[in-house]
């Protein structure tokens, strides 16, 4: 009788050990999968923000595809893209710039003075720069990707 109880105890212990190994293996696979998913999601999100920022700037600039309407300049010490337009005889300017890790946009009358904090946050960006290359062509760079703006010649995106 003792032998039968002892045999059942060993069987129970064996089953518990096998179940524990199985549960531990499942847990490890789940943790590994979650880590891989998190890494892929982070990489995907980084590229998405850069592409979204460039697409946003391209769309805004495309609406003002006229010679002289796009300029690169300095907005209170920050490089910015300026879009100039006239509405009802009044000069307006849209400034697009990177401030405190955010893409900002500020629409105002050209004659008025504003600070970078007065703009509207559009989306989070780490690295955004503007520079005029030649013949009115403007290069916008966000995280290693580049957008080339060329008014009156079909604004386009060139990712390099």
Image (tube, grey):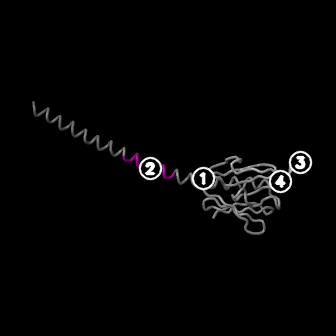
Closer mark to the observer between disc 3 and disc 1: 3
- Picture coordinates of residue 105 (x, y %)? 71, 50
Q: Are marks 2 and 4 in contact (CB under 8 Å)?
A: no
As drawn, 160 above or below 10 = below
Residue at image location 36% in from the left, 47% down from the top = 28
SS for callout 3: loop
* Quadrant assignment for the N terminus: top left
Residue 158 counted in the magenta span: no
Residue visible at 75% across and 69% down? Answer: 134
Quarter of the image with the C terminus is bottom right
In the rendered view, tell whether residue 106 sits above or below residue 159: above
- Give the main secondary structure, helix, strand or loop, of the magenta stretch: helix
Instruction: Residue 112 in the image: state x and y as whole percent.
Output: 80, 50
Q: Which residues are magenta?
A: 28-40
Residue found at x 78% / y 68%: 135
Q: Mark 4: few, some, or many residues within 10 Å (few <14, many ≥20)? A: some
Q: Please tell me the numbered disc located at residue 88.
A: 3
Question: How many neighbours does mark 1 have within 10 angstroms: few (below 14), some (14-19), or many (20 or more)?
Answer: few
Q: Is residue 12 left or right of residue 135?
A: left
Q: Earlier in the sequence, mark 3 or mark 1?
A: 1
Q: What is the secondary structure assignment of the residue under circle 1?
A: helix
Which residue carries the number 1 mark?
A: 48
Q: CA distance from mark 3 to mark 1?
A: 38 Å
Q: Which disc is residue 35 wearing? A: 2
Q: Residues within 10 Å of mark 3 (few under 14, many from 20)?
A: few
State which tag comes first along the sequence, 2 or 3: 2
Q: Who comes first in sequence, dot 1 or dot 2?
A: 2
- Which of pointers 2 and 4 lies earlier in the amino acid sequence? 2
Question: Which residue was labeled with disc 4?
Answer: 85
Q: Which SS class for mark 2?
A: helix
């Amino acid at each position: 009788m003792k032998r039968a109880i002892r045999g059942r105890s060993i069987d129970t212990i064996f089953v518990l050990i096998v179940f524990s190994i199985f549960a531990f293996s499942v847990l490890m696979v789940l943790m590994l999968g979650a880590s891989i998913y998190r890494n892929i999601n982070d990489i995907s999100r980084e590229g998405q923000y850069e592409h979204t920022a460039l697409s946003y700037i391209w769309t805004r600039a495309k609406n003002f595809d006229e010679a002289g309407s796009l300029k690169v300049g300095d907005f209170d010490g920050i490089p910015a893209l300026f879009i100039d337009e006239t509405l009802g005889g009044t000069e307006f300017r849209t400034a697009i710039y990177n401030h405190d890790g955010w893409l900002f946009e500020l629409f105002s009358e050209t004659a008025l003075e504003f600070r970078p904090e007065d703009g509207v946050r559009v989306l989070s960006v780490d690295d955004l720069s503007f520079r005029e290359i030649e013949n009115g062509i403007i290069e916008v760079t966000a995280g290693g990707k580049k957008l080339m703006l060329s008014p009156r010649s079909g604004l386009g995106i060139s990712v390099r």
